[in-house]
Image: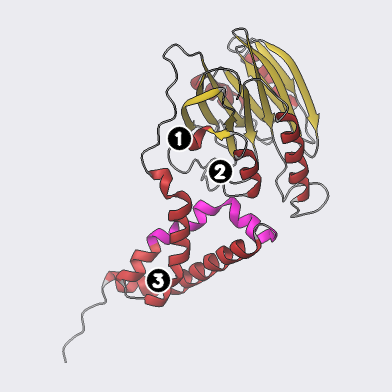
Amino acid sequence: MTEQPPPNILVRLGHLLLWPLLLYGAGASLLLLLRLLSGESLWPVLLFNNFLPALLLPALLFLPLLLLLRRWRAAALQAPPALAFALMYGTLFLPTVSAPTPAADAPQISVLTFNLSLRNRDFEAVVQMLRAVDADVVALQEVNRAAYFYLDDDLADLYPYRAFHPDLQPPGQAVLSRFPILEDNYWQVERAHQRVLLDFGGTPIVLYNVHPVHFTLNRRVFFSFEAQQREIDDILARTVNENVPLLLVGDFNTSDQSAMYQRFAALYSDAFRTVGSGLGLTFPGALPLARLDYVFYNPAFVPLEALVWPDTGGSDHHPVFARLAWVGQSG
């Protein structure tokens, strides 16, 4: 009797993974259908939206594998998430469309937004990271008193102008700047927010450092969009009245595929989307699966560079850095 050759390694792998891949494809396809039918009215869709790129990306690997194994039905379930990823994120991997080129002598400003994390006590790592970035302006979220006492002293030589509002509930905010801080306003809705007016070589620039509550963390109702909606209403009501160059930065606690993001993107430009590359994932720090942190700007600026900083300084967020040229008053 002739001994049968051992199964091909791909066939063995296909048998092993078939049911998990079927469950993944069915689950991702169902959530995409619910997203299409209900928008963001269902909390599973809200969670799905936050982690869309990470949840859809595996389909790009599973689909060709199942086609190779001739598992047609299983492959068909991978097609919707694979197509959704290509439509939503495919252009991010194409060459960046050049932003308008500012004059060579246009003044430049660099900004970093960084959620420190209330649980982060590695302030030496934070200081080292901030010194390595060397941004002109740093907007910090989740600043408590321990962070204030450490950072205010250790960064005084780099940032002579500092506006700290340390707090625990809700977490505080801070702005560190090489430019004079002419005004500093701090307020709370669900979370804390901050507005500073900077003297940028004689030009006033407004920077909003914001931190809207995540829909799972508001103090009233678990899995409710209302608190985040209320905060975003408040932020936009303030920013639309500004008639000076404006930067709007922070941990927005929403993905770039959400309705909340679209409200900001309708009024302001996203520096990373304009000149950055890749998915721009910032959270969680060890294995980023979601994009929650942004640098927005109004027409007074042209972005030159934007990137997710690789060092987290011990936080659960990656900072986002952007360098922009000032090209005139806001449009």
Label 2, label 3: how far apart the Cα atoms are:
28 Å
Query: Looking at the rendering, which quadrant does residue 176 occupy?
Result: top right
Asked if labels 3 and 2 touch by Cβ distance under 8 angstroms, the answer is no
Sequence order check: which comes first, mark 3 or mark 1?
Answer: 3
Q: Position of residue 257 (x, y in %)?
A: 57, 49
- Give amino acid for label 2: Arg
Crowding near the residue tagged with mark 2, few <14, some 14–19, many ≥20 C-alpha atoms within 10 Å: many
Residue extending furthest toward the bottom: 1
At x 68%, y 36%, the residue is 119
Res 291 label: 2
Camera-nearest residue between 56 and 134: 56
- Give amino acid for label 1: Gly
Which residue in the protein does label 3 denote? 75
> What secondary structure prevails in the magenta region?
helix
209 vs 53, left or right, is right
Residue extending furthest toward the left: 2
Question: Where the C terminus falls, by quadrant?
Answer: top right
At x 64%, y 59%, the residue is 39
Q: Secondary structure at mark 3?
A: helix
Label 3, label 1: how far apart the Cα atoms are:
32 Å
Sequence order check: which comes first, mark 2 or mark 1?
Answer: 1
At x 61%, y 13%, the residue is 159
Label 2, label 1: how far apart the Cα atoms are:
13 Å
**Camera-nearest label, 3 or 1:** 1
- Give amino acid for label 3: Ala
Which residue in the protein does label 1 denote? 276
- Say if the magenta span includes residue 83: no
Res 36 label: none
Q: Which residues are magenta?
A: 41-61
